[in-house]
């Protein structure tokens, strides 16, 4: 059995460049080429890998040429608009796909992704690192052990102030600006929905049923642009389609309710707002607390501040086994370890011949929230959630 996965990395912007350094140093990857539409990015990335490997690798600008090298796998870190085309072509060529996250542009893309993966049998995994967050995995473990009782509702969000990233997109050769100019939807749903789906066993014993989305006005980007003279003056009064706050409510066949929040164009600290509510307890990321119907917590249910940040007290007993192994290994990676865990799991699945834990059906259903929310906002209606 091989001990390394030969990979090409496509997309060397903010995410791709930051992950390149870590992947090149992982024991289960061998980077044989890097690719970006901008030649200077590709060449610089190749030099960075060569400094570590001490032998040359290819720097390419055409992703099809990267696939022509016949790697074991491709890691796709391009802008959202490139994810599906490259994934589908790679699977048709028998090249395993690890694809970074983002929303879909249409339901047809989602169905085509599933169809090609099933026809080819080529491994595919959406690299949703938040499914490997320590708190998310601990809560999933606690849910499996029954500590929260029957789960009734979950909440999550991508609540990340991206005003500078969006408004300086052209200068930084980033892809986000057009998404905010042209669409009104939950454009980045998988960070919040992925961990929730794992808690609720979505696409296994439970499924999404309906979706309803609502959008606020779009004011935040214009206000920021007017107060920062180095922002392109054309963006001061342009009409942005993307609402500042988008709320999405999903009904599940198991009776649970999921509430998602996209909040990226107003000032705020970062939070994914991961919250799980059950008949016997709950966890909330905002406050980082666990509250259980165990007698002790119930006596103090009116004194919420006594519970704030108590989740750390549960790690020793309820840390997920994956995290216990990770902490004992001494390995560290980006985003508090999530990046290392998701990329290590993908490589290990390929090397050991195991199915990927985040399936193509998971990817399709999570990314489908984007076009479905766009449809719901536009028509002011509830839409049926398709089965993938």
Image (cartoon, helix red, strand yellow):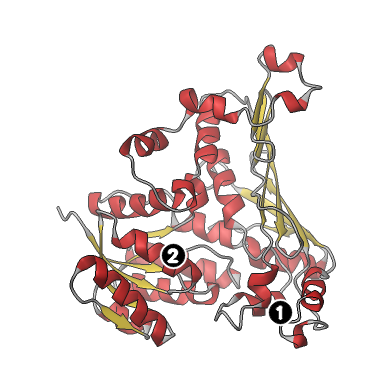
Residue farthest along the left direction in this orientation: 1
Q: Nearer the viewer, residue 123 or 300?
A: 300
Q: Which mark is residue 82?
A: none
**What is the CA distance from the residue labelled 2 to the residue labelled 1?**
28 Å
Q: Position of residue 210 (x, y in %)?
A: 70, 53
Q: Is residue 310 above or below residue 369?
A: above
Specify whether 313 is left or right of 229.
Answer: left
Mark 1 Cα shell of 10 Å, populated few (<14), some (14-19), many (≥20): few
Q: Is residue 386 above or below residue 60?
A: above
Figure quadrant of residue 95: bottom left
Q: Nearer the viewer, residue 252 or 269?
A: 269
- Residue depicted at x 24% and y 78%: 69
Figure quadrant of residue 175: bottom right
- Residue depicted at x 21% and y 58%: 4
Q: Position of residue 222 (x, y in %)?
A: 80, 75
| Contact, mark 2 vs mark 1 (Cβ under 8 Å) | no
Q: Position of residue 330 (x, y in %)?
A: 33, 40
Q: Position of residue 39 (x, y in %)?
A: 39, 86
Q: Nearer the viewer, mark 2 or mark 1?
A: 2
- Residue depicted at x 49% and y 76%: 82
Mark 2 Cα shell of 10 Å, populated few (<14), some (14-19), many (≥20): few
Q: Is residue 186 above or below residue 88?
A: above
Specify whether 150 is left or right of 361.
Answer: right
- Residue depicted at x 69% and y 30%: 308
Q: Is residue 266 visible?
A: yes
Q: Is residue 31 visible?
A: no
Which of pointers 2 and 1 lies earlier in the amino acid sequence? 2
Q: Which mark is residue 182?
A: 1
Q: Secondary structure at mark 2?
A: helix
Residue farthest along the front direction in this orientation: 229
Q: Which residue is mark 2?
A: 18
């Amino acid at each position: 059995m091989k001990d390394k996965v030969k990979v090409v990395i496509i997309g060397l912007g903010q995410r791709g460049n930051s992950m390149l350094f870590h992947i090149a140093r992982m024991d289960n990857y061998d980077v044989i080429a890097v690719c970006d539409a901008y030649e200077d990015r590709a060449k610089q990335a190749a030099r960075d890998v060569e400094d570590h490997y001490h032998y040359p690798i290819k720097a390419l600008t055409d992703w099809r040429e990267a696939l022509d090298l016949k790697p074991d796998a491709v890691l796709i870190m391009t802008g959202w608009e490139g994810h599906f085309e490259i994934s589908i072509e790679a699977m048709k060529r028998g090249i395993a796909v690890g694809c970074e996250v983002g929303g879909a542009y249409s339901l047809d893309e989602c169905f085509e992704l599933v169809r090609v993966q099933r026809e080819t049998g080529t491994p595919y995994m959406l690299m949703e690192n938040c499914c490997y967050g320590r708190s998310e995995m601990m809560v999933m473990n606690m849910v499996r052990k029954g500590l929260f009782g029957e789960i009734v509702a979950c909440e999550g969000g991508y609540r990340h102030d991206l005003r500078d990233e969006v408004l300086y997109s052209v200068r930084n050769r980033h892809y986000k600006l057009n998404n905010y100019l042209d669409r009104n939807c939950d454009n980045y749903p998988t960070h919040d929905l992925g961990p929730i789906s794992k808690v609720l066993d979505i696409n296994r014993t439970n499924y999404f049923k309906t979706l309803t989305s609502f959008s606020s006005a779009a004011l935040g980007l214009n206000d920021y642009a007017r107060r920062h003279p180095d922002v392109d003056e054309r963006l001061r009064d342009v009409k942005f389609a993307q609402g500042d706050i988008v709320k999405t409510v999903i009904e599940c066949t198991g009776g649970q309710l999921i509430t998602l929040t996209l909040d990226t164009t107003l000032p705020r600290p970062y939070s994914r707002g991961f919250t799980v509510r059950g008949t016997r307890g709950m966890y909330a990321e905002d406050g980082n607390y666990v509250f259980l119907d165990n007698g002790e917590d119930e006596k103090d249910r009116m004194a919420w501040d006594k519970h704030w940040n108590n989740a750390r007290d549960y790690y020793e007993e309820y840390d997920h086994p994956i995290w216990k192994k990770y902490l004992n290994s001494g390995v560290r990676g980006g985003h508090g370890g999530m990046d290392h865990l998701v990329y290590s799991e993908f490589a290990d699945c390929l090397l050991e011949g195991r199915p990927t834990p985040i399936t193509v059906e998971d990817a399709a259903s999570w990314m489908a929230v984007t076009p479905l929310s766009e449809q719901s906002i536009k028509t002011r209606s509830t839409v049926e959630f398709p089965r993938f």
